[in-house]
Amino acid sequence: MKIAVIDGMGGGIGAQVVARLKQVLRAEDSLVALGTNAIATGGMVKAGAQIGATGENAIIVSAPTADVIVGPVGIIIPNSLLGEITPGIATAIASCKAVKILVPIAQPHVELIGLEARPLSAVLDDVAARVSGLLMVGG
């Protein structure tokens, strides 16, 4: 199974996701870091992604090839992450067939109602558990 972790800005969330996913992946699974900038991509590769690519075109081309996409909720909201998520990136991610596992990180112009306040580490543990479950079912 191909899992793409997408992040921008400093890549901190993506790097934490990659580190957790490394613990649940099987040998036949691949973990790809897709960053909106080189710092984000580098952080995710340093955390353990097998390969990384950077920029709008890399994300637009790579997202449809993933089975699972993980990242902050902003990756499907145009102009989020301080403008790093272009409409093209958001559309490519939201419209591809991959299962999207989105971390509910607050965006200044979007409110997510009905989510309980939980520590980020607990949410990221849930992300890893969900991907692990998909690997058991899908692989």
Image (cartoon, rainbow, N blue to C red):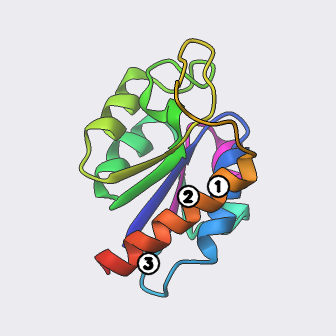
Q: Are marks 1 and 2 in contact (CB under 8 Å)?
A: yes
- Residue 10: quadrant of the picture: top right
x then y, percent, for residue 103: 56, 43
Number of the front mark, 2 or 3 = 2
Which disc, if any, is residue 124? Answer: 1
Which disc, if any, is residue 29? Answer: 3
| Above or below for 66 versus 94 | below
Instruction: Specify the segment rendered in magenta.
Output: 31-44
Q: CA distance from mark 1 to mark 2?
A: 5 Å
Tell me if residue 28 is in the magenta stretch: no
Q: Are marks 2 and 3 in contact (CB under 8 Å)?
A: no
| Above or below for 20 versus 61 | below
Q: CA distance from mark 3 to mark 1?
A: 19 Å
Q: CA distance from mark 2 to mark 3?
A: 16 Å
| Residue at the image position 52 percent from the left and 29 percent from the top | 114
Which disc, if any, is residue 127? Answer: 2
Amino acid type of the residue that numbered disc 2 sits on in the rendered structure: Val
Identify the element where label 2 is drawn.
Answer: helix
| Residue at the image position 40 percent from the left and 38 percent from the top | 57
Amino acid type of the residue that numbered disc 1 sits on in the rendered structure: Leu
